[in-house]
Each structure stands twice: as C-alpha cells, then as structure tokens.
Image (spheres, helix red, strand yellow):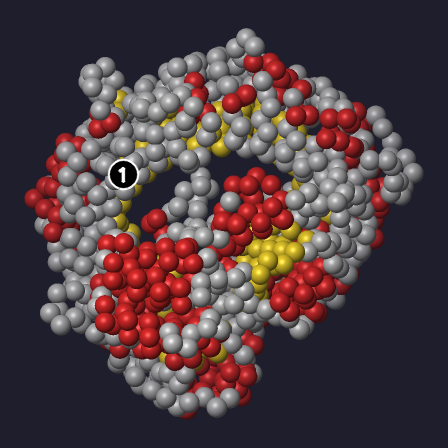
Amino acid sequence: MITATKVFGRRKESEEAIGWLTKPSVGDAEIEVSKVSVVSIVGHGGMGKTTLAQLIHNDDTITRHFDKVIWACVSTTFNATTVIRNILENATWATNGASTLDALQKILREKLDSLKFLVILDDVWEDKTDDQWGKLFAPLRAGKNGSKILLTTRMKGVAEMADQVMRGENKLLELQGLDEDDNIELFSHHAFPSCGLQDDAAFKRTGEQIAKNLRGCPLVTKVVGAHLRDNMRLDYWNEFLMQSLKHFYGGSEDIMDVLKLSYYHLPPVLQTCFRFCSLFPQDYEFQKDQLVEMWVDSGLISQDAFGTQSLVDVGEKYLVQLTRKSFFDLRFRVDLVGQEDRESGYYVMHDLMHDLATNVSFGECLRMVDGGSLENVPSTVRHIRVELIHNFPTEKMKKISCLENLRTIIIVKKIHGVEENIGIRNTVEELVESSKSLRLFQTELQHRSHFASKLAKLKHLRCIILQYTRESMSGVFKLYHLRRLIWRSTKIGSKQVRDVGYLDRLQYVSYGGSGCSMVPVARLTSLRVLKNYHITRIRGYNMSALKDLGSLRSLSVDTLENVDNQEEAKKAKMKEKKCLVSLRLGWTECDGVRSRTDELILDSLEPHANLKKLCISRFRGSRIPHWIAESRVANLVELDFNFCEHIEELPSLGKLLKLKDLTLRGLIRLRRIGQPLNASGDGRMESFLPPSLQKLNIKQCLKLEELPLLPPSLVRLDIQEVGLIRLPRIVKLHISSDESISSKWLHIMVRSCQCLTSLEGSLFEQKQCIQVIREMSIIDCMHLESAPFPFEEMNELREIRIENCPELRLLSGAEDKLPLPSLKTLAMGRCGDLELLLLESLQVFTNLSNLSLRNCSVVESLPSADVFANLTSLRIISLIGCRNLSSLGGLRSLPRLEDLELLNCSKLAEAGLSLSFGVSGCEEEPGSFKQIKDIMIDHPALLLVEPVRSLCPTYRLQIRDGSEMLDAIEPWLLRNCTSLQHLWISKVNLESLPLSLSELSSLETLRLYDSDQLRSLPNVPSSLQTLFIQKCHSELRKKASERGSLEWNKISHIPHVQIGGYCFSKGEQYNKYTGFQVQEVMNHTNKTWCWSTA
C-alpha cells in the first residue's frame, strides 16, 4: 500500500468516486463473468489524478468493501504482459517464474476468481490498441460481481477504450482545477512552510493572485510555491506574476513552460542530478541510498566547498532540495498494521517531471527499451540504461559502440530465466572495454571469459555490480577509485578476500551473498556498510580493526566471544562513530555460563547517541549495558534482544522517547520489565514502557510473569511462549469512555502462554482498546479459562483465531453477542465454549471469506444449506483433525468456494469408504459449484463424499496419502479431465499409475512423492509442463535416463522433469545442482536452469 501526502481539496471528487465504486451492482448475488465496471479519472497532467486515486486506495470504506485492492502503475508503454505481472507483484502474489502472457493471465485469473476486487491502473495512455486491452481485461473478468477497475488518464479516449472493451457499467470523472480557496491553501503550504500568507499583507495579496492565476493545477502550484519560497523578495514575486504567468492559461504547454522555468532556476548540480533520473521509467520507485550512490558513482557530485561533508551527505542534501522543490515526491508504504513505515520511504517523479527530465537530458542520458531507441544516438551521451536487453538484436546493440565517453552503463534483464544471447553479451563487453571514462557499471548478464580482467583496465570505475561471475576478480582489486563492489561468485579464494582490503576508498562491498565476513577492513576507512563481520584474535581481524571506520552507517559484528577484555573493546571507538545508525552485536552462542567479562565488554561498546537501530544477540551477561539502562542512546527507534539467556531484569525503557519497536526473544531468565507497578504512585508515562512504542514482540521468555502498562501508541502486541499470568492493560489516558485510544488499528497475538488463566483485568476490558482491534489470535493457551471478549463492541475485528484453548469458558450472557460485521477470517479449534457458539453464529458473519476448523471434536456436521447460502464471500474452508465430522452439511450451497482442505477427518473418510462413485460425468445439480480451484485431502476416499465427489471443474488436486484406494479416484479424474491442471500425490504405493492420467488434457503439473514402488509411467498428456517424482524405483530412474527407451519417449516432450534426482528438459539430461547439460559441463555452453523442488 502507499500513502498520499497532505491533500488539499478533492473531498467532493473523492466521495463521488468512492460512492460509484461501492455502489451495489445489479444482480450482486450472482457471479458476473463478463462485465467489470470501470471508473475513469480523466484530467490534464498535474491535476492530481494519482493523488486522488491514492486517497481512494487508502480509504477505509474501500478496504471494507473489497476483498482485495491492488495498485498498478501503467505509464506510456502499455503491454498486457507487463501490466499483469505488475498487478500480481503488487498484490504480493507469486508468479512462480511465469513470463508468458498466457501463464500470467492464468495465474491472475485463478487469484481473482470469486474475489470482489478493485484494481487501480494509474497513468494509462493507450487509447488505440484494443487487442492489448482485451488481453489485460480477460483475467479481470473472473472476479465476483461488484469488482471494479479504477483508472487514471490524461485522455478521454483511454476511458472510452476501456469502456468499449469491458462493456460494464462505467463512470467518468473529469478532474478540473482545484477551487481557488484550496489552491491558495496549497500554495501557502509550499511557499510558506512555517507560516501562512496572512503574516504579511503584501505577500498575501501577491501570493493569492499568483495562486489564482495558476488555474488550480496542483503540481504547478507546488512547484511555483517551492520556487518562490527560495526567492522571498516581494519585487521578485510581482515580477513572476506579471511576466512568467502573463500567458499562463493552464494548458499542457503552459504547464511544461512553468516547470522548465523552475528547472532552469535550479543550481547546475541539481539540474544534472535531476537529468540523470530520466534513465529510469515513469513511476520508478527510487530508494534514497540507491539514487544518491548512483549520483556519486557517476561523478555527478563534487565535494562541498569546505570539504566537511562526504559526497553521500552532499547527495542526500541535493535530494532533499529537489524534493522540497517538488521535483520528487516522497511517499511511504503502509504496513500490515496500517502504519506508515517512515523508515523506508521512497521517491517518485511525477510523470510530467519525468517528461521534463527526458526533454532536458537529450544528448546526455539514454534509456533503451527497444531497438527503435537506438536510431541516431548522439555521440554526446554519457549515461545509458538498457532494459529487457534480451529483446535487442545484436546488430542494433552494436550501434552504441560509438559511445566512447560513457560514464554510466546499467544493464537490466528484468525477466530472469531467459536464455542469454552470447552476441549481446559480447557487444556489451566490447562497449564496456572501450568506455575508458566509465564510472558506474551494473549488469544482470552472466559475464565470463576474463571479463574481470577487462574491467581492471578501467581506472576511473567507482562502482561494479556483477551477477554470477564465475571467474577470479583479482584484477579488479587494483581499481583504487572503487567505492562499491558487489559480485556473486561460486569461486572466491581467500587471497581475493584479502585483496579487497587494499581498496581503501571502498564504501560498500559484498561478495557471494555473504557480506564481507573475512575482509581485512582496517584500511577501508571510507566503509559505510559492514555486514556479518567476524571478530577473531588474528591481527587485522580484531576489534581494533574497526577503530578508524568513522564513516560507518550500518555495522553487524559477530563472534564477540573473541574479544578478551573491555580494553580491547574500547579500541573499536564505537562512541566516535557519529554516522552509525544501525548496529548489531552478536556472540556465536550462549553456552549457559554467565560472563561478567561480556558485561564489561558490552559497556565498552557504547555507540554514539545518533544510533537508531540496535540488536544484541546471544549476549552472555546478566544485565543490559549501562548506556541503554541510562537512556544514553536516546534516538533509538528499534531495539532487539535475541537469546540473551542470562538477563533477569530489564528497565522499563520509558525514557527512550523515540523507541517504536521493541523485541525480546529467548530471554529465558527474564523475570521483570521495569519496577513493580505500585512502586511509583504518580503514574507517569516514563515509569512504564516507551511512550511512542508501536510494536512489542516478546517470545520465549517463560519466567516473565507480568508486563508494565502499555502505551496508547501501540499497534501490534505479539506475545508467544511467555510465562505471563495476566495480560497487561493500556495506560489510562484522560479521555472519555466513548473515545478510542488511537485512530490506528490494534493487532494482538497471544500464543503458548501456559500460565495464563484469565483475560480479565486486561486490555480486553478497556472499551477504547477493543474498538480498534483489527486482528486477534489466542492460540495454544492450554489453561486459559476466562475470556471476557466483548464481541458486541468489536466492530472492526476482521480476523479472529482461537485455537487449542480447551478450558475456555464464556462469561454469562455472551451467547447472543456475536455480530462481528467486519469479520473476514475465522480460525478455531479446541476452544471450549467458543467452538459451538462461533459455528452456530456463522450466518451473521456475512463478510467471512476464510473458515478454518482444527481439532474441533464437538463438530459432527457443518451447518445447513441455508447458512452457507448467506455466506456469499466465503472462499476458503479448511477442516483439519475434526475426528467426529461425518457430514459436510449444506456445503453445496456455498456460492463462492475456492479452496477446500480436508485432513485427518477420520469419520468423514470412513463415510467415503462406504460409498461407490456411481455414473461418471459432471452432473449439474441445483446449487452445485461452478468451479473450485484447489482441493487438498489426505485420503482418496474423501473424493467419494458429497459434495466433494460432485466438484467440477477443479483445477488443482493434492492427495497427502495415496497409499490406499488410489484407483478409486479414476472416475473423479475423468469428471475433471478437461479442467484439472495440477495433480500432487504423496505416498504412491503403486508400481504403475492409473491410465486415466493420459486423458487429463489440461494437466500441466504432476508431482509424486514417496513413490518407492513406481516402476513405470503411463502416457502423459501433451499439456504437461512439469513432472516431479521423488523416491521412485531405481528401475524407473534407469529407464527414464536411457535415450530412446519406452519411459524416455513418454517424457521427452516435457520441459521440466525431475525423476529420482535426475533432471531432464525435453529429453536432455541436466545436472541437478548446476543446471548445465551433463555433456556440456566442461565448456559451460548451452546453459539452461533446471526446475526442481525437493
């Protein structure tokens, strides 16, 4: 999720769009497979279309109404394959390596099936090619009725094209300029960040007139306001009003002219940094460190006049200035608990700003996305970025060989697993070799054949980022200007590691994915990041090697048991490292013996007060260091103690006013946090946990019986394997009983707390707390008896998991108080009185989408058809260990079932054993499922139980135990022969498989586990893409590997095969571990990676 910055106006437009999007569709009770409504926001560039879409995206009404809300940036290059992949990635759905349009469409269709979704397509331009629109919208038709598409565009033609293709109930919102009052307020916010226009009457009059003349265009208003903020002279403001805005009418050319004016008023170095960003596509999310490092590596930033700041510090200052002037927008994602993650903001250029950067960087920067962009390349180009390089013909790539003065080369593949073109790779290597002025080289190609020796001749290189090089990098270690060196290699010798230590200007190094564990760092005084550094007693690898690394920002140190005393620890000079913001201090293991020496050593490793993140792991002392206890690291935001087994007591940490995230894990002797609650009578916040704490995670602290009062800022409480005898309360604020403690949602997890017997007197009895609980999990609390859950007031509760709490008893009168209007996930099992109560209340959980029953022994039958018919959102049902369950009740009436899991339900399996399958064919019965995606069972007999036997079509079947009755599933397979795509069976106790497998015309994946007796395969359908057989008979392994044999012929057409450790691709055998063809291993040619999963 993303957050919009402070927004002025647009309330009316937002409410109108949300009203359209949440308006019930005609026939909402039925699935409409052909029409999805489209709402289009149309407006000129800079009018705030994306900002309005962000407001809609984050609105709570929207998140309540839709099962899934997905954001996808589209921009100028409209390609259905790219957009669908973007949708899947932004929805955090795995693509499983799929790269073709058909494969991605299929994944998206399966994911959206029966979901009520909202897909937001931002910044769409394509209004001509209905073919690409049709390919994009095809999988979007799979959703539940009421699904919507929201798109933003500058062109009405785009909205008309989307309407024409989708043919749904469509709406158009034309975005006009902001109202005058809103635009004046926006201008004031950017021109006067600390005061309003009313502070000076003359500025007020001129500023209001300027804001009025900007025609309500938010982007221009922001840019002009920021520009004038740096020119606080009234005569300049009047001149700007009379001259620069004289002919401004709000058209596209007028807007671009104003943006150019602001650009040309930037200092030259800011202009250069801004132009560099044209190398990246529209809507690219720049990470601060990534962007600034590239500016520095490419030679765009010079030392400040006094030389007091590092180049990176100067670059960060430039980024702040460009953001303040609205050339970049700083955005934040929203995490799973609804919080802005302020620590991981990213920067985005408005599409008009990207257009401006592309315009003013012509002849200097070149972004190559297809062969057409290689015509008439100016010889003055200094920076290039090549995307999807495998799409470029070799002869076209050679057209850039004339670029002899390149400073930056970035090669991006994006689609991994595509076989590399050797000609392309050679052309890139020739280009690099001829670029004698090259500063930054980054590639995703797999370079070999002495390429490192060619790089070693480029003496100006500042940054090298290589992927999977297979040769020695020793020549590179003579490039003494290198700032960053990142390479992944399977061939790293100790001498190479030692040679890294001679690159004394190096600021970041990582090799083989292991950080720089054994690099001699004493001479690397410019290092900013040092990961996984192992302390030894060898000179050059001890604590004193860190003493001169004053530029470190992030440091991770291991094996501190090799530090002998506090004098040696002091040699690291940790307190002098003012730039250090992240620190991890770790011992190898906590051996059960308390170490007084470790306490003194940790005291001596006191960092500078600027530190923000601290993790202490496997510390062997019994007390925390004085510098934490005395709050001398007052800027801490995150604090972790991991497996510090001898710590018995922690202070409350209440004076760490900025601490937001506290984790205590594996403190097995910890008994107390802070002083007893009655030790101080004034109830001041600093007597308890930090006042800004948002996340509290305590795990594996079995002797900890009580917690201090929790601050009202808390949004996540995670307590697992802790000896608490009672849960804490939220500290009481001076608010009325009707007010909630916060506008943020609260997520609670309590697990394996065996001393917990009651939840009375805890935060569950605080009204202002329970009103904001979004997720609640109480699991494996075996002795919990009393739980006063006030369900009638938990209107925001979306997920409840209560499992393995067998003694749980409800308070009197709770039986009829279970409305829970927002509940989407219900997971329960062995939860005492709650078991039947929750199951009998299912009919009122109308928004329920996921139901899980685990070890519910009192459940003999699922609810009736009338109950299931009302659960129109329920898509996933999991029944595990319900040993007395003998009937699935009215499950047939469930209209949206998508996934069904039946495991360890013995009586249900017995019921199936007593049945015969009957006549084949897929009978359409009233209320039968239209389709189901996934069935997982542990006994084939469950396929004989109604309504499972009637499920048709089914896409995926998994059988956990196929040792019995496997032949009984043949009729079921034949019913689903045209739909079944994936079949997984474990414990195949057969010498051969059912012949019916050859009739599964849509089967793509067949996976068999523990099939020791399997000697032969049936003919498999031509659709099969993946065959995986684990632990088959040696006879089958042997025959499958013999070219021309019967078994080989059966699998020779399949792209991905693994049989008993042997890998094949269309009949050719491959090495399981390297992915090379067996006969080609020596010369490393014709490489193809083997798909395999153990």
Q: Is residue 32 above or below residue 1022?
A: above
Corner quadrant of residue 484: bottom left
Q: Badge 1: how crowded within 10 Å, few (<14), some, or many (20+)?
A: many
Amino acid type of the residue tagged 1 in the rendering: Leu
Q: Residue at x 72, y 33 (%)?
A: 939
Q: Is residue 780 left or right of residue 487?
A: right
For label 1, the SS is loop
For the point 52% across and 41% down, the residue is: 60
Image mark count: 1
Farthest residue to the top: give it.
812
Report the side of 831 relative to 573 (left or right). right
Residue to which mark 1 is pinned: 659
Residue 1006 in the image, given as x and y percentages of width and height: 70, 51
Front-lying residue, 122 or 625: 122
Residue 392 in the image: above or below residue 471: below
Please tell me which residue is depicted at 44% across the width and 44% down the height of the picture. Answer: 335
Front residue of 710 and 742: 742
On the question of residue 11 being in view, the answer is yes
Residue 870 image position (x, y, % from top left): 72, 30
